[in-house]
Image (cartoon, rainbow, N blue to C red):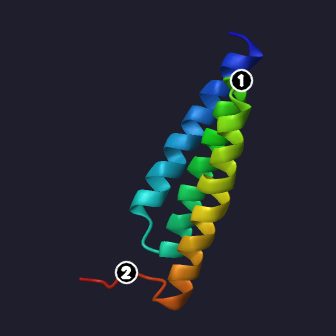
Amino acid sequence: MGLMELGIIILSVLMILSAIFAVIQKNLMLAVLGSSAVSLILTIFFFILHAPDVALTEAAIGVALSTFIFIVALRKTTGFEEEE
């Protein structure tokens, strides 16, 4: 197994763990950060797959803009879900 394959496996595991973290997190701000981590790792995958234009778009929209919009929305509302 080469270094590239090992890197892809590590990134895949990190992306799955970030997605699970974002879904199970009660603190909405941390859930947004987990979602942003998924987008950041996806950006790296696109770069590895030799799609730099898609990687730049994912970085700009998925990581930066979406995270900013979610954080602004959370700051204007509550930061935690209500317990049932």
Type of residue at label 2? Glu
Left-right relation of 74 to 63: left
| Whole-number angstrom distance, CA of label 2 to CA of label 1 | 40 Å
Instruction: Residue 50: give its label.
Output: 1
Q: What amino acid type should be assigned to the residue bearing mark 1?
A: His
In this view, the residue farthest toward the right is 3
Residue 63: x and y, percent? 64, 56
Task: Where is residue 69? Give x, y as percent.
Answer: 57, 72
- Regarding residue 26, the answer to whether it shows in the image is yes
Q: Secondary structure at mark 2?
A: loop
Comparing 62 with 83, the one in front is 62
Residue carrying label 2: 81
Where, quadrant-wise, is the C terminus in this rendering? Answer: bottom left
Image quarter where the N terminus lies is top right
Q: Residue at x 42, y 72 (%)?
A: 26
- In which quarter of the view is residue 53 placed? top right
**Does residue 50 appear to the left or right of 72 in the view shown?**
right
Residue 12, horizontal then vertical, whole percent = 57, 33
Q: Against 83, is 2 above or below?
A: above
